[in-house]
Image: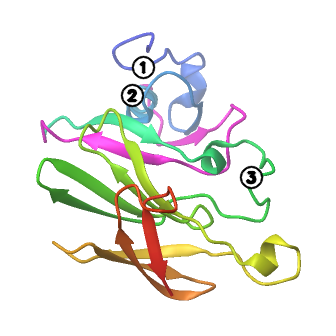
Amino acid sequence: ACATSLGDAVLNAAQVAGNIAVVRRGDCFFEEKADTAFNAGAIAVVLANNQASTPWSGLRIWDYSDPANPVLASTFDTVCSASTSPGTECDPAGTYSVHNVQVETLGNKVLAYVSWYSDGMLVLDVSDPYNPVEVARYVDNSADFIAGNGGNPHDFWGIYKEENSPFFYGSDRNGGLRVFKLKGSGSDGRGASSNP
């Protein structure tokens, strides 16, 4: 929690006034840190990361049940997007961030369809924004690439969900357009199938 209602105390207030404040991340929200710096007279704020962390980022899910006061409900990460250094399951040359998201309400479920570059195409059940659950993923790197014989891994950057249809579309920068159908548990255990 923050030290004060306006964020952590400014330790060098005399140097901040009229200057650009460099602020380290920590327990306070960025908005609280910025407000504190501006109240001390800063003309701008630069936020610096002082923690070892992943170069990628997860998917942030917000609760807008009170539109005037949105709340960060949760963050969903894949193994690779949360990794500070790629392991054997994560290609060191891969890109592990979200690019596009489309959300659809189906009955009492809310599903998020996500293009996640090297992590493939994901479908998350976000009906409870505080507890997102991965229900399907499509990952299909080129066999030649996996074997070290050249070829390109998939690189999903775009998604389009056809409303009230089981189909959604993924744009693979290395393989063109793929058409997906959400199949529940599916025979492959991942819940999504694709046709190039």
> Which numbered circle lies on residue 120?
none
Which is the main secondary structure of the residues drawn in magenta?
A: loop
Q: Residue shown at 42%/29% (left/top)? A: 29
Pick whichever of labels 3 and 1 is earlier in the sequence.
1
Pick whichever of labels 1 and 2 is earlier in the sequence.
1
110 or 60: nearer the viewer: 110
Q: Give, as a three-letter code, the residue at label 2.
A: Glu
Q: Give, as a three-letter code, the residue at label 3.
A: Glu
Measured along the vertical axis of the image, is residue 110 above or below residue 195? above
Query: Which range of residues does the magenta coloring cover?
Result: 39-67
Question: Which residue does the numbered mark 1 point to in the structure image?
Answer: 7
Image depth: mark 3 or mark 1 in front = 3
Question: Which residue does the numbered mark 2 point to in the structure image?
Answer: 32
Pick whichever of labels 3 and 2 is earlier in the sequence.
2
Side of 57 where 73 appears, left or right: left
User: Label 2 near label 1: C-beta < 8 Å?
Assistant: yes
Q: CA distance from mark 1 to mark 2?
A: 5 Å
Question: Which residue does the numbered mark 3 point to in the structure image?
Answer: 89
Magenta stretch holds residue 99: no
Numbered circles on residues, count: 3
Q: Residue shown at 78%/45% (left/top)? A: 85
Side of 103 where 33 appears, left or right: right
Which residue extends farthest top? 3
Q: CA distance from mark 3 to mark 1?
A: 39 Å
